[in-house]
Amino acid sequence: MTFYANLQAEDGHWPSDYSGPLFLIPVLLIACYVTNTSISDAQRKEMVRYLRSAQRVDGGWGLYIEGPGTVFGTTFNYCAMRILGIGGNDPDLVRARKYLHRLGGALTIPSWGKFWLSVLNVYDYDGMHSIFPEMWLLPEWVPIHPSKLWCHCRQVYLPMGYCYGRRLKAAETDLVRQLRQELYVEDYSTIQWKAHRDNVSPADLYTPHSWLLKLAYVFLDYYEKWHIPFIREKALGRCYDNICADDEFTNFINIGAVTKGLNMLVRWSVDGPQHPAFQMHQERISDYLWLGSNGMRVNGTDGSQLWDTVFSVQAFLEAGAAKDTAFLPVLRRAYEFIKSSQIREDPPNYTVYYRQSCKYGWTFTTRDGGWMTPDCTAEAVKSLLCLEHGPESIEPIPVERLHGSVNLLISLQNKSGGFSSYEKQRGGHLLELLNPSEIFGDIMIDYSYIECTSAVLQAVNLYQKTYPTYRASEIREIMHRGLNFIRREQREDGSWEGRWGVCFTYGTWWALEALACMGYHYNTVNQSESVRKACSFLKNYQNDDGGWGEDFESCKQRRYIRSPTSHVISTCWALLGLMAVQYPEVSIVEKGIRFIVSRQLENGDWPQEAVSGVFNKSCAINYANYRNIFPIWTLGRFIARYGQNFLYYT
């Protein structure tokens, strides 16, 4: 705790590296190149240093930092290095080019890559399937209307559709002409672009086109050839209006780095480089940049400030920080950050732009970001309630603001009983058959997730204990339906699949926390077969050294795959789950505790091990603060449950 407390920022949050996907730097650099947005020499050097460190021995780059080489990753980062001023004869780029050509060259890049290369003017828009901006003119009752999509998907394909409809692309420069010769096995001038719309390297393909998407492309590509100009203009106007609204709602940060780059391109194209909106986009690029020991990278969002802070608070409280005067200032600063990060008002006319109410909610990052998430809102409520019953001299948040947060959570429960990552589920599961990304899974709708559902159940359960008369019957109904959802999602082997962390260990921890808060433990009057099966699952995967280690391939293949080595974070998740439900075999827990302690560094830190986060099944992302948060949380819970006799075991 002493080490980690020193990493806290002055405003009370814990800054963190939230990078990992290797397409984020190229996206922002292409946007900067097209719009003539400069970056500093220092940033340029640090980005080059990072990309060199991320390059694989075989010369390629993957979709994410620890992943196998792909055409998408290699092509994108090759282009990024060239934009950053590295010559084509650089030894690392020579290796990358050889690797890319062995895979068939850039013609086999997935659809996202085809789009961005077209923007860079080193691919042709004819080599893409239609992105169909006219979709935004459909009546809202149509099942495929964009409002039904998961917000990340919606906010990416919105500006993509605009750029595609305008055929927005960079000027033909010397660099563009050189890249046209370097990226392809074939002569650029002879490529038959339309023949490569479905040409995707097996190294990249995760979600093949469904029969429904193939059929849709037949009609959409035909329409693209004969589209009606005034309808296209109307559609592009609708897209632009929604893009401007998103910029205003998020203070030009946007929902993620990809959308950030896309919206920036659109505002430059329409409004011009001197327009205040475009200049605001330029100013907020720095929100995404993170300088680490191996160089500068681009985070997936503008950070994970709120998320890491609420977890840090809960870890510190379970570890007894509220009773130690040395940590009271740390908790007070965190409390003020959480309190000030709450969204106080809905954006104007938000329903017109398919947004839901976010008033009294919290984002994953900062209040400026504007995209409220149910799990962050729930964890913030939980943390505030715990802090208000902890350190002295904390000014409580006005109760009407907490009531508003709970009202918001109540409104977000899905028909399944679960909760989604951002919005109440709108679209049907058949929409997933139209997933055009080829590299990601489950991107089309906002599903119900174990993690989000557990977070909400824990928060409203604690809230009902604190304010027992507030909407009591509705909260009980939410907890009942949420618990049923969690039980239904359990697998035969006793595990739950996590969607935002690796993978079955993460999901099982969240599910056990939910069951425990509802009074279901291993040996109690409320005996639960779900709890027993889950504990058996975790016990079966404990390694001989006392730890747990789950490989990222579990996320891709949707089955538990043991890592060659144990990981501290996986071990913490397993132990937190076991202790939450009062698992009686203390020797199992003790072995895990010994493993965690054995990995601690002399300065109080833990080493960075395998990436522990995931999104859309196929891409890893790094939560750097997890390596401190979860060991503190786990050791604190162990001491609270079993006493200071723990010192004997260390």
Image (cartoon, rainbow, N blue to C red):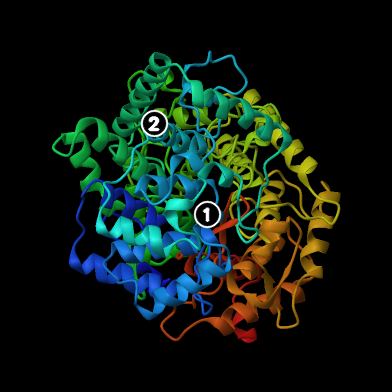
Residue lying farthest front? 190
* Disc number placed over residue 107 in the picture, else none: 1
Q: At 41% from the left edge and 45% from the top edge, which residue is drawn?
A: 118
Q: Is residue 393 visible?
A: no
Q: Amino acid at mark 2?
A: Tyr
SS state under label 2: helix
Image quarter (top left, top right, bottom left or bottom right) of the N terminus: bottom left
Q: Amino acid at mark 1?
A: Leu
Is residue 476 found left or right of 298 in the rendered image?
A: right
Note whether 190 is above or below 461 in the view shown: below
Residue 631 place in picture, x, y as percent = 54, 70
Residue 315 place in picture, x, y as percent = 50, 61
Residue lying farthest left? 274
Asked whether the residues under the numbered discs 1 and 2 touch, taking CB atoms below 8 Å apart as contact, a structural biologist would say: no
Is residue 412 found left or right of 363 in the rendered image?
A: right
**Circle 2 residue:** 162
